[in-house]
Amino acid sequence: MSVITLTTDFGVGSPYIASIKGVILSINPAVTIVDITHDIPSQDIRAGAIVLDDVTSRFPGGTIHVAVIDPGVGTDRKILYAKIGQQCYVLPDNGLLSRLMRQAPPERVICLNNSEYWLPDVSQTFHGRDIMAPVAAHLSLGIDPKLLGDSIDKIDLDDLEWPDVNITSRRIEGEVIEIDSFGNLITNIKSPMLTGKPTDERVCVVCSIYETWGIFSAYANRPRGTFIALVDSANRLELAVVGDSAAERLGIEVGMPVIVAWE
């Protein structure tokens, strides 16, 4: 069974999504199409890169992941096929691969410059439909990726800078990198950074002017309306308001600093 996933900033219900699916199914009617999300904030490449890093490794080997967050559509930016681990990606060269490449280098990267596998008429404003979708569909039928274009070196790919986490014996400094659909604040502080340190009431977690004591294992460990720190399903430190949106209630945005400190 061939699987193609879609990650876009089109918005749920957009007819652009149906257009991409129609192209894919016209070439390979038997393929399974999975929507990862179409709710990436408009043109937010960083948010798209985080989703690809968090989600795509959960799919069966050989899955083809199409990501269309493409503010440079119609320019001379490249469109890529990349294989990282057991997963395959079709997406613009704008940093969407940058977090994945920090986990493992691509085994192969190809610039999609062979128009034989595109639609005959290519719009300058919709390469997701006219180039990425048909290429993904042909890949799902088993064509050799070498036929798609020229191989390129991974060092030539567009990259994004990601904030570092500063760690000392009694303090970790990170920041909010994502706000999930519940309004929870996802940080770049990973659970291994907390290993060997106490997570009880002796640890204080601060974001903006708000602080909470202790790192808990479940939202239900604290009363409704409580500001709480816990480790999420991706093993990152998360800040939440139990039963509410921390982002809306506290006015916290991506990029705000987060400090974990021990007494």
Image (cartoon, rainbow, N blue to C red):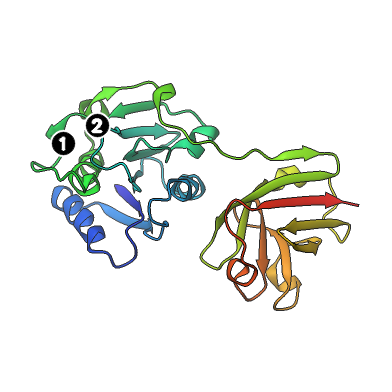
Residue pictured at 35% horizontal, 48% vertical: 69
Quarter residue 148 falls in: top left
Is residue 195 something one can see in this rendering? no
Q: Picture coordinates of residue 203 (x, y %)?
A: 84, 55
Q: Which residue is mark 1?
A: 117
Q: Picture coordinates of residue 228 (x, y %)?
A: 73, 66
Q: Which residue is mark 2?
A: 112
- Which of marks 1 and 2 precedes in the sequence? 2
The residue type indicated by label 2 comes to Leu
Residue pictured at 77% horizontal, 39% vertical: 167
Q: Nearer the viewer, residue 18 or 164?
A: 164
User: Is 206 placed above or below 76 here?
Assistant: below
Within 10 angstroms of label 2, few (less than 14), some, or many (20 or more) residues? many
The residue type indicated by label 1 comes to Tyr
Q: Picture coordinates of residue 198 (x, y %)?
A: 85, 52
Within 10 angstroms of label 1, few (less than 14), some, or many (20 or more) residues? many
**Residues under labels 2 and 1: Cα distance?**
9 Å
Horizontal side of 199 relative to 16 (left or right) equals right
Residue pictured at 17% horizontal, 29% vertical: 114
User: Is 225 placed above or below 202 here?
Assistant: below
User: Is 101 placed above or below 129 here?
Assistant: above
User: Is 104 placed above or below 241 here?
Assistant: above
Residue pictured at 84% horizontal, 47% vertical: 197
Q: Are marks 2 and 1 in contact (CB under 8 Å)?
A: yes
Q: Nearer the viewer, residue 251 or 22?
A: 251
